[in-house]
Image: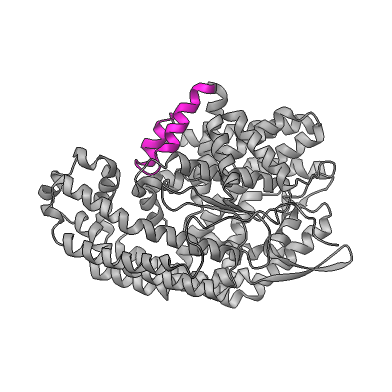
Amino acid sequence: MTTQTTGAESVRWDLHELFSGLDDPKINTVLDDSRARAEAFVGKFKGLLGELSPEALAKAYEMLESITGPLYRLSQYINLLYAVDTADDKIKAMLAKVEQHASTTSNLLVFFSLELGQLSEEQFSKFDGAIALSSFAYKIAKLRKNARYNLSEKEEQIINLKDLNGANAHQKLYNELVASFSFEFELDGEIQTLNGDQLRALRQHPKPDVRQRAMQLFFSRYEDNSLVINHLYNALVKDHGIEVDLRGFDNPISTMNTHNDLSDEAIQALNDVTTESYTLVNRYYKLKAKMLGLDKLTLADIYAPLPEASKFYSFEEAKKLVLDGFRSFDNAFYSMAKTMFDENRIDAPVEPQKRGGAFCSSSTPDLNPYVLLNYTGKVRDVSTMAHEIGHAIHAMFSSDQKLMNYHSILPLAETASIFSEMVLTDSLLKRETDVAVKKSMLTGKLEDIFASSHRQNMFSSFEVVSHAAINDQLQSSGELSELYTIELKKMFGDSVEFTPEYAWEWSSIPHIFNVPFYVYAYNFGNLLVLALYQQYLDEGDSFKPKYKEFLSMGSSASPADITRIVGADINHPDFWRKSLKYIESLIDQLEELVN
């Protein structure tokens, strides 16, 4: 049996807008120029920030952006090349070279934020509220507020350098190790060689035996490599914990909360409210077992397709559905989405050495983003396409911002992507008359919500307990698997059977290795969007201008101020509880179709 073609095989991005290839002379020009300009910046401003006028400080910020912008574009280019071929030695060598140069340049410039944060109140007062600094006001205020977590310039430089062969190297080893995994899997009497994404896609196979064997094989590879993976996770967590102590943060998660400009209490409230709502997960999966005719699901069955509604979408069909969905919402959104296809900014095929999953990459405001997909023709792939293009649209709306304010704040980074998924689902449900297909769409949407919200909350909860455990003493892979199983059982209750291989799932979650406590942003964004989408349904067209203003803000204000534009109060637990009502309404709709 051969893998079904999707039409995505020839959908490749065109990166020539960035550079023409690894031998493009502009690469060395960028590296050399950024170093020279950074050295000149140091000579011009180091030790003198307190003497600058607001106008002069604004010019310093402009110079800083002119140094970092070309490096952002170069880093984006090399990382995009690496994403589609993680085994190419020339790409890996160039990636290491660029990272080394970027680290060196970053070290030269690290004085700027440190010195600005250490100015006396008298020196700093002239910058506060200055019109010339209005574009940088939020960044300056945040920098000033968080200055207490800074180390000395020399210490910051040492951390940047040691990370190259420390945390960064550990993360790279983890990513390259798991990207190298290939799996020999028997399907319909034939042995096929699959990568991790292809094997995990078999969770959506109609046969329970295939689903269960696929996940047993998938996690067995992680268990077989547990010696290395467990060492990497312990090392990364300990490294993070040491930095938490050095900088004086209250908790390991506080580093991300501070970066996101969110209080520990607000994120704890988000976690608590989501954990309370695990009852919705339990209720849904009991309903799904009934739809599948099973007494009880295993964890390998949670994404199983409904027998009467398994459907394949070619890439062109998915493209049309996504564009039609955006058009049904707003012409500006449609136009931006269409640009991504017209300008060849999407890389879609599944390939052995390609990075798994999907992402949207943006570097500087003057360039449109790029999207990576691993398109296999499943309904979730259609939703993923809308999700990643939603990220691109978010970036396009914020393209009038300064580079420093261009990339959206992490807790809000998923807003446009998840909203776009919901627009797509709503568009499809309105046109669909087949009850079986509607059930399939509702199950797909609910499972996407649980994956983006409740599972991310579970991952974050595991991070909290595993960081506490490892910072007390190093943990074995078995001990970490036990901690993870506890979190699994909290989420799914008695709605599923827990097969042993899923205890190793923690070791397959790249975010907990690459960016500690990143994952709660998915939950934050997901529950935020559920409330915003319900608001859109209630308000209609009057909601759209506020939403566009929200997206155009980038990171130019705090999450609380940006969300206030659309009337959200992210600091109140009742806001998060309100957002969960939308999930319950979807389960209600599904129950009406099933019963």
Residue drawn at x 38%, y 40% is 400
Q: Residue at x 39, y 49 (%)?
A: 260
The residue located at (76%, 29%) in the rendering is 592
In this rendering, would 280 be left or right of 161?
A: right
x, y (%) of residue 558?
A: 35, 41
Q: Nearer the viewer, residue 198 or 248?
A: 198
State the residue in front, 21 or 245. 21
Q: Quadrant of the N terminus?
A: bottom right
| Rendering quarter of residue 238 | bottom left
Q: Per the image, is 394 magenta? A: no
The chief SS type of the magenta part is helix
Residue occupying the point 32% across, 65% down:
33
Place residue 374 in its image quadrant.
Answer: bottom right
The quarter of the picture where the C terminus appears is top right
Q: Which residues are magenta?
A: 541-567
Q: Position of residue 121 (x, y in %)?
A: 13, 48
Q: Residue furthest right?
A: 189
Return the x and y of residue 193 as percentages of the image width and height: 76, 69
Residue 521 % position (x, y): 49, 48
Residue nearest the observer in this picture, 339 or 25: 25
